[in-house]
Image (cartoon, rainbow, N blue to C red):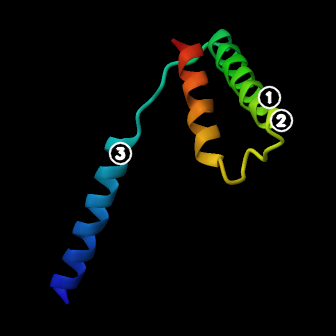
């Protein structure tokens, strides 16, 4: 019985210590500025419009047979815009 109780105490103490170490306090500083979020959003919108225009030109569905092509092109456009 002592072994069971000691085992439970050990598990509880281990879990408590892991949780205590994983709690990292962040300061009040913003990690991402609003300008950065707006910039990312503009890149995403431009890339989606670009890929959408290609799909419209060929009367195709973005989620259809050429989904991987459109996704790769979209990601390339976003990455190019972000750099």
Tag count in the figure? 3
Q: Position of residue 13 (x, y in %)?
A: 27, 60
Q: Which label sits on residue 73?
A: none
Q: Which label sits on residue 56?
A: 2
Taking 37 as reference, is 51 above or below it?
Answer: below
| Left or right of 63 in this view: 26 | left
Q: Quadrant of the N terminus?
A: bottom left
| Left or right of 52 in this view: 73 | left
Q: Are marks 3 and 2 in contact (CB under 8 Å)?
A: no
Indicate the secondary structure of the residue bearing disc 3.
helix
Task: Pick whichever, 66 or 39, lies toward us.
Answer: 66
Indicate the secondary structure of the residue bearing disc 2.
helix
* Outermost residue toward the left in this view: 3
Residue identifier under label 3:
20
Which circle, 1 or 3, is nearer the viewer? Answer: 1
Q: Quadrant of residue 44?
A: top right
Q: Position of residue 67 (x, y in %)?
A: 65, 47
Question: How much space separates mark 1 and mark 3, taking CA atoms?
Answer: 51 Å
Task: Give the residue drawn at x 67%, y 54%.
Answer: 65
| Left or right of 7 in this view: 53 | right
Task: Give the residue drawn at x 65%, y 47%.
Answer: 66
Question: How much space separates mark 2 and mark 1, taking CA atoms?
Answer: 5 Å
């Amino acid at each position: 019985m002592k072994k069971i109780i000691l085992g439970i105490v050990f598990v509880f103490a281990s879990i408590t210590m892991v949780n205590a170490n994983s709690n990292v306090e962040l300061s009040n500083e913003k990690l991402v500025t609003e300008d950065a979020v707006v910039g990312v959003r503009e890149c995403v919108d431009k890339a989606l419009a670009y890929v959408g225009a290609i799909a419209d030109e060929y009367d195709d569905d973005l989620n259809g047979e050429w989904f991987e092509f459109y996704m790769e092109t979209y990601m390339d456009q976003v990455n190019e815009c972000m750099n």
